Amino acid sequence: MTEVFSYQNGTLCAEQVPLESIAAKIGSPFYCYSKARLETNYKNFAEAFQGLNVKIFYAVKASANVAIIRTLAKCGAGADITSAGELERALHAGIKPDQIAYSGVGKSAEEIAEALQHKIHQINVESIPELRAINQVAGKLGVKAAITLRVNPDVDARTNKKISTGDLGTKFGIDSDHLDEAMGLIASLPHLDFKGFHVHIGSHVYDYEPFREAFTKLADMVRFWRGKGFTISRLDLGGGVGIPYDGQSLAPFADYAAIVRETVGDLGCELSFEPGRRLVGDAAVLVASVIYDKQGVSKRFLILDAGMNDLVRPAMYEARHSIMPVRQAPNGQQDSLVDVVGPVCETSDTFGSDYHLAGVGQGDLVAILQAGAYGASMSSNYNGRPLIPEILVSGDQYTVIRRRISVTEQIGWEEKAG
């Protein structure tokens, strides 16, 4: 894969745009996405499943900017949504309703009604009470709701526990002890149009064997319930395939595709996937400036103008991203280990320890890589900080796809009292 974040004439560029030229115009910090990387990631994902009946629903929660959704929609992606707000974003980005799947454990009656009125592709159902709720809403609207049933396969995804969803004890899906009840209810409720099953074992899974275990259980389930007279035409295999972060290794994506073919490829079902991180994770960097270069008793700290409110993954998931100087250090320049931290008043506001960043000091720019997934979409205004810009680069041009949202503007959103 062609590297889209690379040094050109000593400065780090996104495609052909120097990141320091963007910073000079709009200030820091900011997110910068590569359109070419988004397109390449989608193409590589889709081509891995050539010959199979496949739909790809981009997991909007990973990066919900309308311009990002629209870019992937033009590549052929649908949308995997988890709220009415994400439904609105997907539709605004140009995704057709019949290319939208609705996931999530807590869909309200109003959200279900909106999804059904738009005639989306399917609702992925997470619980027995939700089956009843969807049937009731669909009955009031005089429609049948296309659904898949999310099953909990009791598989350890071997990822961070905060993003592991396929083992018992999590809030997700129907476990085996309640599957008979759920299937019996589906058969009895007149406003449900059962299409098949859905499974999603977790996020940032970089060991593919848990997928094999889950998909094997899913294939057995399909054969069993077909034997009971159920028509099963769709399997939603979720998302969760990881990307290499700093120092991590990942098996070739072809290995994952081979597991899909070996386990469920011969069932005659429409297969769908919900990639998020895989499409956008390595397509963006977070660019920040060093406010202070602080030497402590035992550690040297680079204190950035970006914090955990801008990129929460290191604080929330102990994630480690690659970090690069925007201005390349001369060959042979000595470096020392530094901790890269933010300005927020939390000890957890750190991007990581013991980075080699030669030539970086106060006033310099750094780029935090692999920042496209769960970066801007999880950002906040904690500590009274502005929401930072998002930039989309294409070739030698860039577009501001979200401007900086000042604190003054945020205050204007609030109810005036007194």
Image (cartoon, rainbow, N blue to C red):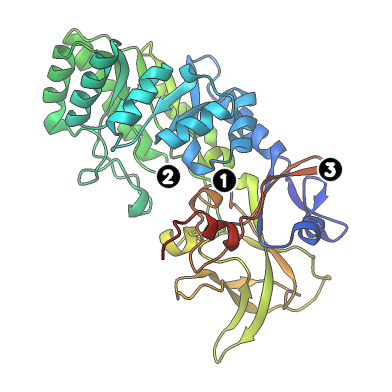
Ranked by sequence position, the earlier of labels 2 and 1 is: 2
The residue drawn where x is 67% and y is 76% is: 291
| Badge 2 element | loop
Please state which amino acid type lies under the numbered disc 1: Gly
Is residue 274 among what the camera can see? no
**Discs 2/3, front:** 3
The residue drawn where x is 42% and y is 44% is: 205
Specify few, some or many for label 2: CA neighbours under 10 Å numbering under 14, 14-19, or 20 or more: many
| Badge 3 element | loop
Tell me whether circle 2 and circle 3 mark residues in contact (CB < 8 Å).
no
Q: Which mark is drawn over residue 168?
A: none
Please state which amino acid type lies under the numbered disc 3: Asp
Q: Residue 2 occupies which quadrant of the picture?
A: top right
Please state which amino acid type lies under the numbered disc 2: Val
Q: How many marks?
A: 3
Residue placed most toward the observer, 50 or 127 = 127
Specify few, some or many for label 3: CA neighbours under 10 Å numbering under 14, 14-19, or 20 or more: few
In space, the residues marked 2 and 3 are separated at their CA atoms by: 34 Å
Q: Which mark is drawn over residue 396?
A: 3
In space, the residues marked 3 and 1 are separated at their CA atoms by: 21 Å
Q: Which residue is mark 1?
A: 281
**Discs 2/1, front:** 1
In space, the residues marked 2 and 1 are separated at their CA atoms by: 13 Å
Q: Residue 409 occupies which quadrant of the picture?
A: bottom right
Asked if 268 appears above or below 352 in the picture, the reply is above
Query: Residue 388 in the image: x percent, y percent?
Result: 62, 57
Quarter of the image for the N terminus: give it.
top right
Query: Residue 247 in the image: x percent, y percent?
Result: 56, 58
Q: Which residue is mark 2?
A: 205
